[in-house]
Image (spheres, rainbow, N blue to C red):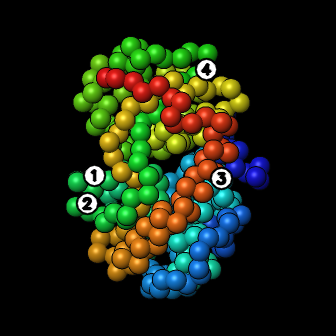
Amino acid sequence: MKLNSKFIGTALGCLMALSAPALAAEGYGDCKLYGERGSEKVETAVPGQFTVVINLPAVGEFNGDTPETVESGREFCMAVNIAHRLGIDKVVLKNASFDSIVAGQNKEFDIALALISVTEPRKKVVDFSTPYASGAFGLATRADAPVDEAGIKTTKLGTQAGTIMVQWAQENLPDAKLSVFDDTGAMFTALAAGNVDVVMTDISVILGQVANSNGKLKVVGQFPSGRDTAGIYQKGSAAKPAIDKVIADLAADGTLKALEEQYLAAERGGLKPEDVPVWKY
């Protein structure tokens, strides 16, 4: 795996990821292709390319400091394999804030992939793809100052704006001192600096960040989310039926499982979601 996939683990690495929206290099990166090219057809938002909105940093999902450097990752290679089955050779990534993605503010893209939970309020402004995973809320602390199951209820807790975890924390951990950050990079920078004691985001992201922190971070627990993870389309997208079929095919033929094992297992350094304690609240 290329070195540019190892970018989180220091506050500097997090700060480098805080960049304006940008376009990625063309092509399929290092992704292995599965299935028949061009098995489905679709008219893309920008002719001749498959445009994917993402939210960096996303260790294990989109490995790179910026969209231009992403060449591997579970969600990236999922996008590449969707493009492959649509007969499209050009994949373009557009980095955007998570808030803007779930609010339906982005235009001229084919799908957004950012470990997005399906919710009824979001369905009012965007359309969701066929689910491709199920999520949980992972919890990471500094390794030298871990937070336990009892302590989480009153600790300084950080999470990301626009996620369902903001309301969840307000309702289920009302005595925690909650800080909400614009993006994952800022959140982990705050954790490294001691401005918060624990951060909460998707378990996949937590495990990737911890594995790449050179021992500075520790995963301590998780809360079940009870939510499916899916991509987002612009409301009324004509491409939804074809892309949904491809995602369902990727799940049915084992491609999604293969990508999970190849990229998430590698980035997690042997850490598995099933090995993380499930906490009660």
Q: Residues within 10 Å of mark 1 (few under 14, many from 20)?
A: some
Mark 1: which amino acid?
Thr
- The residue that label 1 is drawn on is 119
Q: Residues within 10 Å of mark 4 (few under 14, many from 20)?
A: some
Please tell me the numbered disc located at residue 123. Answer: 2
- The image shows residue 97 at horizontal and vertical percentages of 45, 53
Rounded to the nearest angstrom, the CA distance separating label 3 from label 2 is 31 Å
Disc number lying in front (3 or 2): 3
The kind of secondary structure element at disc 4 is loop
Relative depth, front residue between 259 and 204: 259
- The residue that label 3 is drawn on is 262
Residue at the (68%, 61%) spot, across then down:
71
Q: Does the residue at mark 2 contact the one at mark 1 (Cβ under 8 Å)?
A: yes
- The image shows residue 62 at horizontal and vertical percentages of 60, 55
Disc on the earlier residue, 2 or 4: 2
- The image shows residue 274 at horizontal and vertical percentages of 50, 34
- The residue that label 4 is drawn on is 143
Mark 4: which amino acid?
Ala
Disc number lying in front (3 or 4): 3
Relative depth, front residue between 173 and 228: 228
